[in-house]
Image (spheres, grey):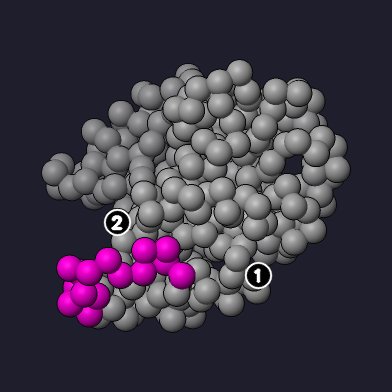
């Protein structure tokens, strides 16, 4: 593969109206094979209730991941399931421990139910699990672990999470958010489902929005033990995955081989761009997601605006850094060209 460092900023900037969207962690591939046909077929039944509890999709997922069907609940995306999980676990006067920076919606989700988010700073861009365990009090009801972590991409291994669980009191539920697990090296990534099987405090949340490319369909699932699933299921009809989303998810599961091939393409491009950025002096943590994290600190907002002015939209977290989604080759090359132009970029570390 050619080296993007040779691309000139002038070549990329000739079309000033060109906008590359690298801020939303979308995959750039079109719908997986069979998804469009499945959705079109489902339109014939769109006037009916359909499978309100997504029992068919839940059973299929359970078979795919080798857990009992009663351990799976499907909802309108992983964020909806996380919000409902937080509502059932915490409330006013109670706390939810989370790493920071992590998924930017976590604090708002906790605040939505009147609970207090307890943010624990990352250490070297990774979850500081010792500090998170130390932050637990008798008011703590839930701990959120994003693995791989969004926005830094860093990965926690099985032994690390196992040690964390051993350090936590029995009253704390641990939710492992695995939205990006398909992009991570399985040798390095903790297997949340195995932890779930070993410990009834652990639940795992996954989504069809990322690797399966169904972001607009809003379909996700949560794997938990039956007492937790029963509580979540009481309100399931109100945050249900709709019939079209269920059809799309079932078809996407049928195309799992193609999904994995596409993930491999994204991972290869992620690793290429990380190497090229390192060559120009912009160091990034190793990532297990479909994105890279640039720890630019106070330069984050200025860098994001700089890239936008050059036709590439990235996500900046003020005072922290910039997250860059891996797009297609042209988008990634445009980003590298913009980054190379940023004043003083070679001094970043």
Please report the residue visible at 32 percent of the width from the left and 81 percent of the height from the top.
34
Let me know if residue 50 is in the magenta part. Answer: yes
Let me know if residue 144 is in the magenta part. Answer: no
Q: Position of residue 139 (x, y in %)?
A: 70, 23
Q: Position of residue 74 (x, y in %)?
A: 47, 60
In the foreground, 156 or 321: 156
Please report the residue visible at 21 percent of the width from the left and 74 percent of the height from the top.
45
In the foreground, 270 or 2: 270
Quick one: label 2 or label 1, which is nearer the N terminus?
Answer: 1
Instruction: From this view, report whether residue 295 is shown above or below residue 279.
Output: above
Point out which mark residue 216 bears.
2
Give the residue pinned by disc 1.
Answer: 67
Of circles 2 and 1, the one toward us is 1
Instruction: From this view, report whether residue 136 is shown above or below residue 338.
Output: above
Task: Name the quarter where the C terminus is drawn.
Answer: top right
Q: Position of residue 19 (x, y in %)?
A: 21, 46
Spatial CA span between label 2 and label 1: 27 Å
What span is in magenta? 40-55
Instruction: From this view, report whether residue 1 is shown above or below residue 77.
Output: below
Please report the residue visible at 29 percent of the width from the left and 47 percent of the height from the top.
21
Q: Is residue 129 visible?
A: no
Secondary element type, mark 2: helix
* Number of marks present in the image shown: 2
Please report the residue visible at 30 percent of the width from the left and 70 percent of the height from the top.
50
Left or right of 90? Residue 312 is left
């Amino acid at each position: 593969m050619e080296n993007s460092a040779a691309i000139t900023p002038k070549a990329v900037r000739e079309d000033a109206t060109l906008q590359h969207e690298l801020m939303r962690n979308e995959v750039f591939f079109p719908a997986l094979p069979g998804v469009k046909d499945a959705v079109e077929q489902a339109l014939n039944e769109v006037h009916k209730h359909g499978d309100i509890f997504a029992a068919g999709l839940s059973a299929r997922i359970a078979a795919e991941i080798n857990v009992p069907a009663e351990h799976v609940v499907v909802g309108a995306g992983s964020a909806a399931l996380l919000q409902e999980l937080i509502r059932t676990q915490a409330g006013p006067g109670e706390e939810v421990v989370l790493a920071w920076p992590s998924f930017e919606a976590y604090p708002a989700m906790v605040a939505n139910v009147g609970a207090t988010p307890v943010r624990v700073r990352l250490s070297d861009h990774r979850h500081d699990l010792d500090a998170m365990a130390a932050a637990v009090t008798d008011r703590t009801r839930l701990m959120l672990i994003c693995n791989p972590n969004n926005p830094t991409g860093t990965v926690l291994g099985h032994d690390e999470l196992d040690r964390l669980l051993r350090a936590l009191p029995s009253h704390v539920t641990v939710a492992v958010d695995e939205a990006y697990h398909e992009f991570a090296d399985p040798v390095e990534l903790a297997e949340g489902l195995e932890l779930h099987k070993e410990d009834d405090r652990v639940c795992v949340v996954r989504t069809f929005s990322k690797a399966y490319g169904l972001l607009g369909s809003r379909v996700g699932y949560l794997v938990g033990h039956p007492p937790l699933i029963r509580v979540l299921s009481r309100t399931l009809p109100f945050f249900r995955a709709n019939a079209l989303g269920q059809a799309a998810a079932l078809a996407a599961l049928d195309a799992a081989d193609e999904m994995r091939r596409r993930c491999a393409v994204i991972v290869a491009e992620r690793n290429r761009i990380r190497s090229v950025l390192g060559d120009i002096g912009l160091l990034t943590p190793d990532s297990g997601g479909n994105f890279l994290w640039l720890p630019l600190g106070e330069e984050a907002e200025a860098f994001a605006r700089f890239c936008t002015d050059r036709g590439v939209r990235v996500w900046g977290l003020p005072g922290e850094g910039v997250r860059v989604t891996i797009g297609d080759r042209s988008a990634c090359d445009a980003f590298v060209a913009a980054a190379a132009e940023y004043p003083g970029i070679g001094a970043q570390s």
